[in-house]
Image (cartoon, grey):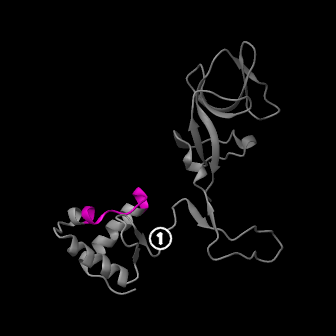
Amino acid sequence: MQTLTLRQQEIYDYLKDRIVNRGYGPTVREIGSQFGIKSPNGVMCHLKALEKKGLISRESHMSRAIQLSDPPHAVTELPYFGLLEIGKSFPSYGPDDRLDFSDLFSASGSCCFRVRGSDLESENIASGDTIVVVRQPTFQDGDLTVIVCENGMIQIQRLYQEKMRIRIETGLKSDSPVYVKSVVVIGIVASVIRQY
């Protein structure tokens, strides 16, 4: 890659920010306004220089047709090397294969909590894990939920609606279920993220 002037770098960073964070590039007028360049020709000179240096491409006669030549991958993607089977040869993979985790974050109203405590091992949740929770006040039978109990304590439990009460189960066969008339549901556990 050829060296950029300070102004070219600033404009390139602005283009990249707009394309990545907004989803489409700025117009020539927006670029001029951002950098105090009064003439559209002045903006075009910088764009032509960036294009010549291989950083962007443009479609002629389209106002928002600026594309990054090497667009960054979404932060929700990682290179995917395939299925790792212990004792087998290393999997083959394509250099552009990626695994997209955006579904973890796409539900509206999602939030996350770091969990402390060891009483959720039956749900495959360990102390230090992060849970992604879809915030909603309702549940389906068997949903793993974040709830506020009648005593004000927070719990992560499976809920079941019965005729006149709600059954709360811990997931441990040795524990008896608890029955309550009502419960405040913060949300449904959608995913567990574990870092070692």
Q: Residue at x 63, y 39 (%)?
A: 189
Judging from the image, what secondary structure is the residue with disc 1 in?
loop
Q: Is residue 156 left or right of residue 109?
A: right
Residue at (31% x, 63% y) in the render: 27
Residue at image mark 1: 71
Residue 85: image location, x then y, percent? 80, 68
Q: Is residue 191 above or below residue 56?
A: above
Q: Is 30 within the magenta?
A: yes
Residue 33 highlighted magenta (yes or no): no
Give the magenta part as a residue range.
20-31
Relative image position of residue 107 (x, y in whole percent): 56, 43
Pick the front one: 135 or 119: 135
Q: Crowding at label 1, few (<14), some or many (≥20) Cα neighbours within 10 Å?
A: few
Can you say which quadrant of the picture contains the N terminus? bottom left
Residue 55, image x, y percentages: 40, 78
Does the rendering let one see residue 115?
no
